[in-house]
Amino acid sequence: MISVQNISKHYGPVKAVDGVSFEVAEGETVALLGTSGCGKTTTLKMINRLIEPTAGELFIDGKNVKDQPAELLRRSIGYVLQNTGLFPHYTIEENIGVVPSLLKWDKQKTRQRTLELLEKLHLPQDVLKQYPSQLSGGQQQRVGLARALVADAPVLLMDEPFGALDNITRTKIQEEFKQLDELKRKTIIMVTHDVQEAFTLADRICLMHKGKIVQIGTPQQLLFHPAIDFVKQFLEGQRLQLELASVKVTDLWDNFSDQPGEDAESETADITIWEAFRLFTNGRTSVTFSRANERKKIDFSALMLAFQQYQEQQTA
Amino acid sequence: MNQQQTLWQFMQQQSDKLLTQTLEHIGLTFISLLLAIAVGVPLGIFISRRRSFAGSILGVAGVLQTIPSIALLGFMIPMLGIGAKPAIAALLIYALLPVIRNTYTGITGVDPSIKEAAQAMGMSKSDILRKVELPLAMPVILAGIRTAAVINVGVATLASFIAAGGLGEFIFGGISLNNSNMILAGAIPAALLAILFDVSLARVQKLNVKKLAAASKALVVIFILLAGFYLAPAAYGSKLLAGFTPEFMGRQDGDLGLKEKYGLKIRTLVISDAVMYKAAYQKRLDVISGYSTDGRLKAFNLVTLQDDRAIFPPYYAAPLVSDNALKKFPLLEQTLNLLSGHINDSVMTELNYRTDYLHETPEKVARDFLVKEGLFRPSRQGNDGTVRIGSKIFGEQYILAEMYRMLIEGNTNYAVSTKTGLGGTKICFDALTNNQIDFYPEYTGTGLLVMLQPDQQTLNSLGSNRDKTYNYVKSEFYEKYRLHWLKPIGFNNSYALMMRQQQAAALHIKTISDLKRFLDNK
Ligand SMILES: Nc1ncnc2c1ncn2[C@@H]1O[C@H](COP(=O)(O)OP(=O)(O)OP(=O)(O)O)[C@@H](O)[C@H]1O
Ligand SMILES: [Mg+2]
């Protein structure tokens, strides 16, 4: 869907982005991760031509982005900014309606679509007549998302979309974000410097350093098969948490001893271990997981043992 | 003239003029403001795009604004003549800086992430300007327009110097006539206008962004309507165009008398005497109100029209001396009287011409004249007390003061100090009565109309009779103020209507009555 081919952006001697290439498949979510100043934002902005690359080519759906006027290109790409970038002089309704009005939608259609998004994003209808300054940070961010989604652009670019929120609100919105079916169909590139966020939300992670890509791969690949030491060091501080958040119960399936579960109720094995932990609350000692037709009944210590074995296998 | 007249009575009596002047004032302010917006806002936008030009453009606008207003008006005359055009251009220049600067600051001050969001959503550059940058910058831009409006209300008072009308006509007329009611009748409305515009624009500025967009559009319409006031036709048309000073306009022995006694109907502009003569010479004006001994009369080839119905009282110059001084300096009176009879109108005009137009120093002109007349004696360097001479702030008075100095120093043992340039009549007179000076040259007509202000009946009885006026003023001054009028010097520096020599000859106009006949002849 998106093909980035050897793009660079130089500001005089500063190589903000230096020969970066990657592909993003349709419907995939890729996170651009890295320390401050490594070129994430610059890379992202070259995709919708807010920044013109010094060298290299960019294709969306096989078409070079330079083949159409930047304005038209941008109307087909959703964009979410860190500090929302909502127009302070527009009501929420008008803010969401900016792209539809550029696309000359009729009022009825815009209105309908706006209401639909409000509902999906858990925003009350009264916000429509309000101005951004009257909303909380979390609500503003949701409106920012609604504005990017309203025209149903197939591609969504996000620059630290949750960066300005407090921890609790961020986790909540990230959670909703994952659940949003609207997003599941979209090809998403998001910039973040929050490792946790990248691991939670992205299918693949593109780790950058000093304008170059260090490694691009799934969370597990980065965790267990780091390309160079830098990757390992980068993830070291939060390794356990990241592993728990990225390894799934299905990944451990073969490490469980065969104890066919007999409970009537079973849980899907397609959840992370972190999520599985939550099932063991309220005095539950064992949980029956199901994968395809198989069922296995597992207690907490069996889960931890299997996870330990998995870690050893991966790094071996 | 009635001293007891209140401001309110004055305003009622002059309500026609007051209304016209106020409308002209508003019109001038807003025409120039509109132009400043039309020029300044695009320039501000331009430099917010090309920041490298910002310094130089703001710099030029800043320098223009520091030019003193009178000087700026002066510069405009050779290029744009007199009247509305140069006044509007000058006002435009003053209004430009705040408009450009605030547009620039307003636009560059818009949060970059908002601009980026607009861009990222696919808005075109002009969309971003119209829908994002300008609306968000509007409060700042309005603040600039507000500043410009207030500046313009102030500067527009000076428009009356170059015949562009406005409340300055009352203000400056009042100052030269020493008529506080007239000053206030101009100054108060001007101040009120400034406050009104300031407060209402401040209101608009504080509206929320949504209403602001509508309000800004409404403002433009309102500004255009207000600007239209200026075009409201005021005077009647006529074959010739007159330019009178604000002072002349307000005097019984000026425009009022011309209307009353001659029934003169001429299209009239109000203009400062600094540019009036030249404007007549350049054929921008046909008839002007001048002083009969003004040097420019000669310089610009103008002739005075005969005052055949005697509305201009005689303005014979004579030294006005305090009683003290005559007692303290026994030789003073006879010394000052030495000059009497030596200077007639055309001699004085010639002398004025040499200082005002050839830029010779008053001292040289005075000395040359005394030498020629055989009155000059070298200074005796005496130290028998110091005589203090005062003078008003124009060339003729400087020359007379110099002559008196030389006469006193040459004929007596008194020393002399001169306090020249004591502003107008009022200042000289006050200096004399408060014993700051010993004498100064004054004119009988001024003494009569400005100081004594007798009733109409007395005025009628004096008419334009030179001796009657002199005697009346002399005795009244002694009675009221203990001041002495010495012998008249000889020349009569009265008001006069003037025309270009050539035109007057061609139209056979010699007297004011001729002028009226010509104008009435359709
Ligand atoms: N307009 C510019 N002129 C010069 N240097 C720039 C410009 N924009 C970015 N840079 C430099 O390019 C590098 C990459 O910037 P970029 O904004 O892409 O970083 P980032 O990874 O998004 O960082 P952060 O996490 O802090 O947002 C930085 O070193 C930055 O200083
Ligand atoms: Mg960034």
Image (cartoon, coloured by chain):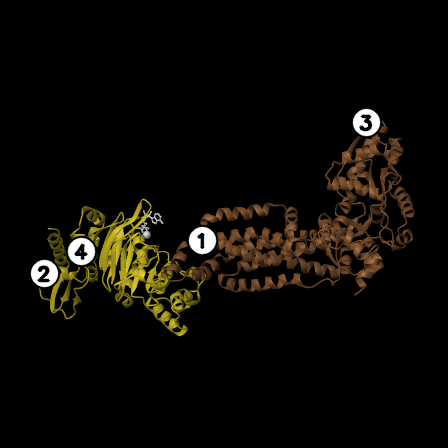
Q: CA distance from mark 2 to mark 4?
A: 17 Å
Q: Is residue A166 found left or right of B365 in the rendered image?
A: left
Chain A in the picture: what colour?
yellow
Instruction: Measure the C-alpha gap from mark 1 to mark 2.
Output: 64 Å
Q: Are marks 1 and 4 in one subunit?
A: no
Q: Amino acid at mark 1?
A: Arg
Q: Secondary structure at mark 3?
A: loop
Q: Is mark 1 within 8 Å of ligand 1?
A: no
The answer to whether A96 is drawn above or below residue B367 in the figure is below
Residue B379 circle label: 3
Task: For marks 3 and 2, give the one nearer the viewer.
Answer: 3
Q: What residue is drawn where x is 45% and y is 53%?
A: B49
The amino acid marked with disc number 4 is Gln
Of the residues tagged 1 and 2, which is closer to the observer?
1
Between A264 and A224, the residue placed more toward the observer is: A224
**At 55% from the left edge and 48% from the top edge, which residue is drawn?**
B61
Output the letter for the chain in brown: B
Give the residue number, with chain letter if any, for mark 2: A254
Instruction: Find residue A220 and name its label.
Output: 4
Task: Kindly identify which chain the residue marked by label 1 belongs to.
Answer: B
Of badges 2 and 4, nearer the viewer stands 4
Label 1 in the same subunit as label 3: yes
Q: Earlier in the sequence, mark 2 or mark 4?
A: 4
Identify which amino acid the numbered label 2 is placed on.
Answer: Asp
Q: Dot 3, how many residues are within 10 Å of its Cα: few (below 14), some (14-19), or many (20+)?
A: some
Give the chain of mark 4: A
Three-letter residue code for mark 3: Ser
User: Who's the residue at 90% across and 47% down the image?
Assistant: B466
Image quadrant in which you'd find residue A276: bottom left
> In the drawing, does residue B115 fall left or right of residue B150?
left
